Image: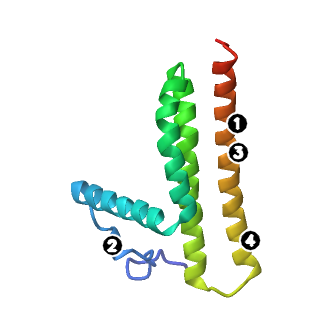
Amino acid sequence: MHDRPPSADTIPTPMTNPHKGRTGLDRVMRATRYSMDGLRMAYLGEQAFRQEVWLAAVLLPLGLWLGRTWVETALLLGSVLLVLIVELLNSGIEAAIDRVSLELHDLSKRAKDLASAAVFLSLVLCAMVWLMALWQRLAGGS
């Protein structure tokens, strides 16, 4: 027997998401609205994110003053924004885990702890960047 190439009827089609059919400006507008909804939900529902937003509200303008070059300014501002980004991802992982089950499970704990560690490392990075920039500025270095 010879194997025949599969016909269009027998080729499995990947699962498609009916909500992914948007294109052009409509897609951009909806994606922007969903992003704003996510930021609003995070601010209202996640105390850690809210605290980090208030810290960012102080640090971002300060970073514009502290940075002497565009690279320094980008590192200062970027390190703060990275904390917010990682916190959003952490909150999303926690929500997905809780959606699946609120039952205590080793894999759920592992996922949440790993996401929390990512937030911690982003905070460490941010602190290091800011401390080095402050040291440079206060020590009168170039």
Q: Residues within 10 Å of mark 1 (few under 14, many from 20)?
A: some
Q: Earlier in the sequence, mark 2 or mark 3?
A: 2
Residue 62: x percent and y percent? 51, 32
Q: Earlier in the sequence, mark 4 or mark 1?
A: 4
Residue 27: x percent and y percent? 28, 59
58 or 142, which lies in front?
A: 58
Q: Is residue 71 left or right of residue 6?
A: right
Cα–Cα gap, marks 2 and 1 = 42 Å
Q: Is residue 12 left or right of residue 1?
A: left
Q: Marks 1 and 3: CB-CB under 8 Å?
A: yes
Residue found 51% across the figure and 58% down from its top: 50
Identified by mark 2, the residue type is His
User: Which residue was labeled with disc 4?
Assistant: 110
Residue 121: x percent and y percent? 70, 49
User: Which residue was labeled with disc 2?
Assistant: 19
Cα–Cα gap, marks 2 and 3 = 38 Å
Identified by mark 1, the residue type is Met
Q: Residues within 10 Å of mark 2 (few under 14, many from 20)?
A: few
Cα–Cα gap, marks 4 and 1 = 27 Å
User: Which residue was labeled with disc 1?
Assistant: 128
> Which dot, 4 or 1, sits closer to the camera?
1
Residue found 50% across the figure and 41% down from its top: 58
Identified by mark 4, the residue type is Arg
Identified by mark 3, the residue type is Val
